[in-house]
Image: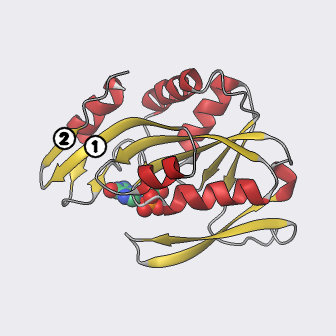
Amino acid sequence: MKQLEDKIRDEGQALSEHVLKVDAFLNHQVDPVLMQAIGREFADRFRDAGIDRIVTLESSGIAPAMMTALEMNIPFVFARKRKSLTLQDDLVEADVYSFTKQETNRISLSRRFVQPGERVLVIDDFLANGEAALGLTQLVESAGAVVAGVGIVIEKSFQPGRDKLLERGYQVESLARIAKLEAGEISFMEVVR
Ligand code: 5GP
């Protein structure tokens, strides 16, 4: 998606060979016009997948997931990283290891908001090692629903997440695919669509 790649080039920062900082438009300050375009692009790519609902992870998945849900006219729900007082029982849970934070979070979702048999689109901001996305697919499947696709805003294609998702048979659509990061330089995959 050209608009997203341009934004990453202009405002993203390669902090190292592994980490891209995008807090100017995606995961701290949020660019609503870009999010709207992202929502339209995901809606376009999954238009024929018969999606009933979107599941994402707080907090950075919320903006792209919400814009996609609005565009597709379907509900979305975000998995929580911490238990809340009001989110106590009838949960599905999965453990997600974060390589960036070097810690495991138990993520959870209320069964009330994912019905058995529903076709669910999983959306997240980044795909790196695939832990977060796989945790989300696990929640969906534990609730008895079907993962109908995985939509990623920024994929770091030099890390193994994409292959892990493809191995499990999921359709993966990433709006920007990064081939390589070097301090100060960001290279994208040549994508033929
Ligand atoms: P994974 O579980 O695929 O290893 O990583 C996905 C999660 O880690 C994302 O939801 C995101 O929060 C975080 N993450 C992974 N790599 C990066 C990165 O290069 N930059 C930022 N800002 N977050 C990242």
Asked whether the beta carbons under mark 2 and mark 1 sit within 8 Å of each other, the answer is yes
Q: Amino acid at mark 2?
A: Ser
* Ligand number 1: quarter of image: bottom left
Circle 2 is placed at which residue position? 187
Circle 1 is placed at which residue position? 178
Locate residue 121: give its quadrant. top right
x, y percentage for residue 78? 67, 52
Up/down of 82 relative to 13, above or below: below
Locate residue 80: give its quadrant. bottom right
Q: Quadrant of the N terminus?
A: top left
Is the residue marked by circle 1 packed among few (<14), some (14-19), or many (20+) residues within 10 Å? many
Question: In the rendered structure, which disc, 2 or 1, sits on the residue that comes first in sequence?
Answer: 1
Q: Of residues 169 and 97, which is closer to you in this image?
A: 169
Secondary structure of the residue carrying tag 2 is strand
Secondary structure of the residue carrying tag 1 is strand
Left or right of 128? Residue 74 is right
